[in-house]
Image (cartoon, rainbow, N blue to C red):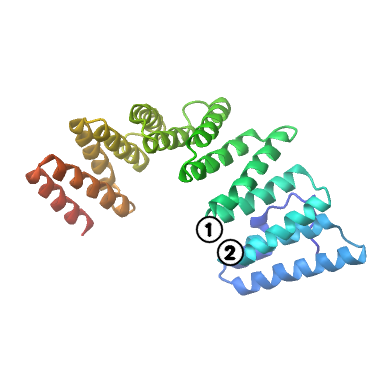
Amino acid sequence: MIPDADSNETLTEDPAMIMIREGRGDEAMQWAIAQVSEARQAEEDGDGTLLQLAVALERLGTVAKELGDVDGAEAALREALEAALKAEGSLSLLAGLRTNLATLLDFSQREADAVPLYEQAIADYEAMDPAEVEVAAQLRNNLAMIYKGLGKFALAEQHYLRALEVLEGKQGAASEPVAAVYNNLGGLYYTAGFAEQAKEMFTQGMNTRVELLGEDHPDVAQSHCNLATVFHELGDNETAVEHFERSLDILEKHVQDEAASFEAVGGDYVSLLELMGEEKKMLAVRKRLQKALA
């Protein structure tokens, strides 16, 4: 059956996605390819539309992405976007295709190629009636991370602040997406050399996480670690030690699931203690790490 461009069926409900979950990846790919072939033939014969072809290609791209075929996924999604543009598809369809392609490129370390797709997808979501401003805000968060990595700090800040404004307005100040943006803003300011502003953002993010998740959640531990780094940058190593200790205490309670984070935070803490000349304490922390990770 040719996929209907106006169907509300989600990609995860496709037979291909069911096959993938059952470990039948080859069958899933064959099914998706057959759907594209059917849609392509129908369009050529005048029995189908470019929009139906675009939807089939998007599904093929999704299957390829799930199976780790980045090149195949990119080719299918680009063709899907071209078909949707020719058919003057809805903003919803275009935004979804651009988002899928942008995230594929982003997480394949092709961030610069993802930028224009993110920008256009954001514009699409904000131009809808009603506007999908929360989705656009999440994409702004992704885009800001790329701009930060490219050293374009002013652009990154612009997108983070816009995302923060929207998410606070829609979900309230005490929400995990808002806390995440505060944390990302803190990372931006720290990287850009503004430690005081970074401290303010990290503190706000941590306070929100404590309110939402409790004091012993791993995300709160991450916030403590971020603050430890900032306080060291500000020359307040005593407070940095307090935050490192609190971060380790939390992560040690979750060490089975958070072993990598526990080891990483512990390594940073050991480096700080060594820098401070606290050899006895440094050795004690190392012993604590070895015992917990064993």
| Residue at (57, 68) in percent of width and height | 22
Residue located 31% across and 40% down the image: 221
Q: Is residue 239 left or right of residue 97?
A: left
Residue furthest to the left in view is 280
Question: Residue placed at 51% from the left, 37% from the top?
Answer: 156
Badge 1 marks a residue whose secondary structure is loop
Q: Position of residue 268 (x, y in %)?
A: 24, 46
> Pointers 1 and 2 in contact (CB under 8 A)?
yes
Residue 66 - label: none
Q: Please, what is the three-letter code of the amino acid marked with disc 2?
A: Val
The answer to whether 80 appears left or right of 272 in the picture is right
**Amino acid type for the residue under numbered disc 1:** Ser
Residue linked to disc 1: 108
Residue underneath mark 2: 70
Say which element carries label 2.
Answer: helix
Q: Quadrant of the N terminus?
A: bottom right
Image coordinates of residue 140 in percent, x first then y, are 57, 38
Query: Callout 2 environment at 10 Å: few (<14), some (14 to 19), or many (20+)?
Result: some
